[in-house]
Image: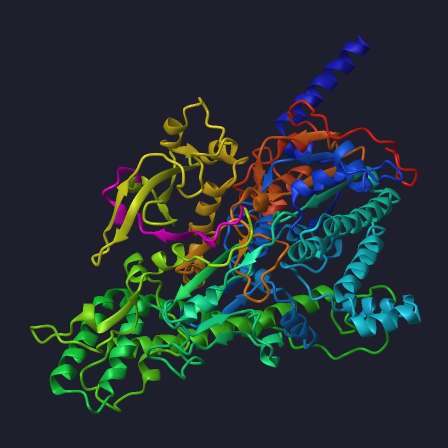
Amino acid sequence: MIARSVAARRLLLFAMLVASPGMAAAETKRLVVIKADGLAQEIVEQMVRERNPRTGQSVLPWIERLFFKNGTRISNFYVRGMSLSGPSWSMLDTGQHLSIKGNVEFDRYTQHSYDYLNFFPFWLGAVAGRYNDMWGTAVLDDQKIPLLLDAYPYDERYQSFQLFQRGKRLATISEGLQKRFTTRSARDLVDEWFLGFDIRGLLTEQLERELIETLDDPRARYLDFYTTDFDHAAHHNKDHATHRAALQELDAIIGRIWTAISRTPQAPETTLVLVADHGVNSDERFYSQGFNLVHLLAGQAGGGHHVVTKRRLMKDYSIKGIYPLVPLITTTSADSPYLKGKSDDYPTALVDFDGNERASIHLRDAALNVLQILFGQLQRPDLSPQMRRAATDAFLRVVDRHRLQWQRTLAELPEEVAALQRASEALRAIIPPPPERKTGKSKTDKTQPLLGETSEQLNERIRKTARLEAWTTDVAEYTAYLATLERLLGATPATLAPGAVRAEDLFAPRAMGERNTLHDLANYVVGTGPSGLVLAPDGSLDFDRSFARVDYFALLTSARVRNNVQRGVTNAPVDFTAVRIDCRALASSSDAAQADTCVWLDAGEEAQAIVLGRIGGDGGLLLKYLPVSRLAEDAHGVIHFSPVGWRAGLPLKFWEDERLAAPGGDRAAWLDGWHGELEWLRATHRTLYSNAIIGLHEHFRRFDLPAADPAAGDEGLIRRLRARQRAIVEPDLVVLANNHWNFDVRGFNPGGNHGSFFRISTHSTLMLAGGERTGIPQGLDVQEPYDSLSFVPTMFALTGQLDEKGLPGPALRERGFQPFPGRVIREVLPAGEAPPRLPAVEPVKPASAARSF
């Protein structure tokens, strides 16, 4: 009878655990996350199997022991979106769809730059008490998207230096410097003096010490450790030995952290996680070749643009080029057709090549080019009366053609700016003044600022002050832009007369205007034609002959190099370009009529495709790949194309890829249909381009921000402004590099790169190991594919912070967390329905120094 009742209770408990992800995950009370930038799953798998010839053990003994033999690894874990650090970490830190979509983003109206990877201005500003959060964190805060660590109170978390950092951590730098000088021998210090101080190593050592010390604090429930060492090594070196050395350093860090965990009372309830943001396209057989997009755009064939970048070019050796506080670097073109000597005021191209296997390009609104060319001609005193009338009429007609769009901006943006101004004034009123400094030193809290406030209060005051500064800047910059736009819309023949107004009064310096249409980009005006302005027979301006144009789609896809000496590497640096297009302009297509997001992929006139996305009846995402050719937009905004059949050579090369797992075996029939994202992921994740269909949709779709409270007054207008800001940082063109090519003009990384949709770049790392009470499966190799949207909900499921429906629990909702769109990785949960375990690695003898399980 007793045996039966025990069995019944056990069965009931098992059923409850399966039904409730929150209860199933309740035994992970402490989460320790190691964030390894650029750690590719293939390289980890390869090196775990590599044996040390002297000991017979794996060259990565801790990773093998913890994650391969005694933990769980997700062997098919992918970046969702482009394999860039900024966007990828934003998704891993929030569990929400992409809002930040580049390592560098430019505001088209003001040319304000968001340089998410640049730590130096942040640190210097933090020393001055201006900043408390990294740039990406501040952007997410404005959109009310919390980070994973925000689920934990200030005194229950430890966060290392990283892209989405909250808190300035100046004590870490100070103590790291002290430790470096007090623990190094005189000889080592002299060597470092001559060879250069290893600042990255200094911080890594100090952050590891702090994390291990924090493990002794029973209050700590969330700790993370971020390292870029492998990513940097893989970028600059393609050899196996360099990669192995970088991974062995990481392996040793993991071992020391796990050893420290095992000594704490919380060890049985602690889960250790190793996660990466993306992989890396590194192959010992190939030297990653570089192609200079900046040079192409600045040259005559590319339009003679003055090009703005956030990174110095490889050819530049100047203080301006290396000084980290210079916000933007302009490459002046000697071939500029109409803006010679005006590169500081009127750059016409913005390029973000960070990420290397892809680049984003903003081109100045072609309408502004036409208007400024005409304005310049109208300032000439020798212009004939007939030509003056024609040019004036042409100027006003171009303005009228864009009047509705610009008037909409003039109607909406001032409302948003006014709301932000009122919010700024309200924020200013509640920021407390800094208290007077105390004397003495804190013996209990190394981060104590020695002020009459706690560390958390200090951080919050600085955070509000930085937010006020950013909002004030937004108000000033958008107000200035709106003033010029209003004057442009009010232009008359009198204002266009020579000397009546300055160019700066009509054309905001450094402003790029609205995004260009497909027609604009294929017929982009860069200057006057060979004969200057030309009159048509009826006395009007002949637009076709008066202006020189560039087709950027043809320019990029036809780019070739003459001296490609590597076998297996094409002489075409550009794989394809990707552009978001208006689905409504594709009304002739029944498929497009159902879509809300459309992305055109162009690899040449005969090799094109449209990726279509829509929300299905059950609320899930549906995607379709439509092969086309000769797509073009006419002057009236209608997009025409020719459908084509399935064949080799189309963008993403699914048709010819043997690893495409099309259900049913009929590739053509399956590829012709609409499918959910999980169907696409399962079918394509092992192909050359992996989950590119999902990633392209993720990158180009404009996701809604969390809904504003209707009763909150100005909140709705400010939320609309934030959505506008995310829209106007979207570039005109995204350029994807062919395999083993990169666009990193500052130094053309020879080792490996990322940023593309190649599987080798998108295939990331996720592994877990836990104490005996966490229920993390041992020796489990999860083959089901997942992407980075699954990371945060899985962490919250493990720690029991999701409710019975898998939604954020009350504590998370109170902190601003919204429902998570990603799947929980149920295989890692204590009661998850795990598939059969697969052979992990060859058995090895336990290392004598390793902790036994």
Q: Magenta region: which residues? A: 568-591
Colour scheme shown? rainbow
Using the image, determine if residue 186 lies above or below residue 691.
below
Q: Quarter-wise, where is residue 517 in the image?
A: bottom left
Q: Nearer the viewer, residue 356 or 505?
A: 356
Q: Nearer the viewer, residue 124 or 672?
A: 672
Query: In the drawing, does residue 594 fall left or right of residue 395?
Result: right
Residue 16 seen in this snapshot: yes
Q: Nearer the viewer, residue 13 or 749?
A: 749
Query: In the drawing, does residue 95 fall left or right of residue 613?
Result: right
Using the image, determine if residue 752 lies above or below residue 802.
below
Name the image quarter holding the N terminus.
top right
Using the image, determine if residue 644 lies above or below residue 193.
above
Name the image quarter holding the C terminus.
top right
Residue 145 highlighted magenta (yes or no)? no
Residue 721 seen in this snapshot: no
Give residue 600's position: percent from left, percent from top. 36, 48
Residue lying at 81% horizontally and 36% vertically, measured from the top left? 65
Give residue 383's position: percent from left, percent from top. 18, 87
Residue 585 highlighted magenta (yes or no)? yes
